[in-house]
Image: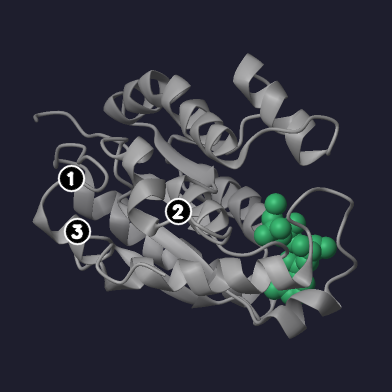
Amino acid sequence: MSHRRGALIVLEGVDRAGKTTQCKKLVQALRKSGRPVEMLRFPDRTTKIGQLISAYLEKNYNLEDHAVHLLFSANRWELEPLLRQKLEQGVSLVVDRYAFSGVAFTSAKPGFSLEWCMNPDVGLPKPDLVLYLQLSPEVAAQRGEFGAERYETSDFQRTVLQRYQHFKKDPSLNWQVIDAAKSIEDVHTEIKTHSEMAIEAVQYQPIAELWKGDSANQATEENP
Ligand SMILES: Nc1ncnc2c1ncn2[C@@H]1O[C@H](COP(=O)(O)OP(=O)(O)O)[C@@H](O)[C@H]1O
Ligand SMILES: [Mg+2]
């Protein structure tokens, strides 16, 4: 590839870890240093599929657990051409949640293996950097009450937090654990450094595919 591509940077973590706060600050900082960058979030509630997901999360609509998992994945796939286009145009993307949230949330439900949960997202553009904002449920609780949406309970979030730990085991993934209990500015500084490094490192590399190839399987060996 002769021209530079953008980097795909994903922020993950449990509710109130600071993902949205940090995505916005990161985009501002990268823009300020003259880098083309855009922010995305999943689920994207603006599409038709996203509206169904939104109604489900707001508890206005019930969906079977497998069906809703596939909708979350479909919501990522419907934006896949846009993601790829932006990256190829040299625009870096800062993404608030991605397939890791999909897997962590559904596999926190009884009867769902990690492998089943990962399958629909196999082949999506692979993030060049995942910033996992690590926060204990106790500290998260101090950041305010849960809202009224589905999944916003301490017990469920605790299980989600456990499920996230599996991704650390995939050596092909640039999974960086960030201590999200630090101040907003300190977290930002750390995230910005990682992001700038990733943008430089991948600019002449092709976009990889998520969970394809040998190393991807290592993350699925220990199904819950
Ligand atoms: N490092 C931090 N220290 C203290 N409070 C924070 C920190 N980061 C975010 N917050 C606050 O915690 C709440 C949740 O942050 P938010 O960015 O919405 O988290 P998420 O998107 O991960 O759910 C907000 O009120 C935010 O201002
Ligand atoms: Mg958020």
Disc 1 residue: CB within 8 Å of ligand 1:
no
Q: Amino acid at mark 2?
A: Phe
Quadrant in which the C terminus is drawn: bottom left
Secondary element type, mark 1 = loop
Q: Position of residue 203 (x, y in %)?
A: 21, 43
Q: Answer with the quarter of the image where residue 172 lies.
A: bottom left
In whole angstroms, how far apart are the C-alphas of marks 3 and 2?
A: 15 Å
Q: Nearer the viewer, residue 121 or 222?
A: 222
Disc 2 residue: CB within 8 Å of ligand 1:
no
Q: Amino acid at mark 1?
A: Lys
Labelled pair 2, 1 in contact (Cβ < 8 Å): no
18 sits to left or right of 57: left
Q: Earlier in the sequence, mark 3 or mark 1?
A: 1
Q: Earlier in the sequence, mark 3 or mark 2?
A: 2
Labelled pair 3, 2 in contact (Cβ < 8 Å): no
Q: Is residue 103 above or below residue 89?
A: below
Q: Which residue is the site of mark 1?
A: 212
Q: Amino acid at mark 3?
A: Asn
Q: Answer with the quarter of the image where residue 53 lies.
A: top right
Q: Which residue is the site of mark 2?
A: 100
Q: Which residue is the site of mark 3?
A: 217
Labelled pair 3, 1 in contact (Cβ < 8 Å): no
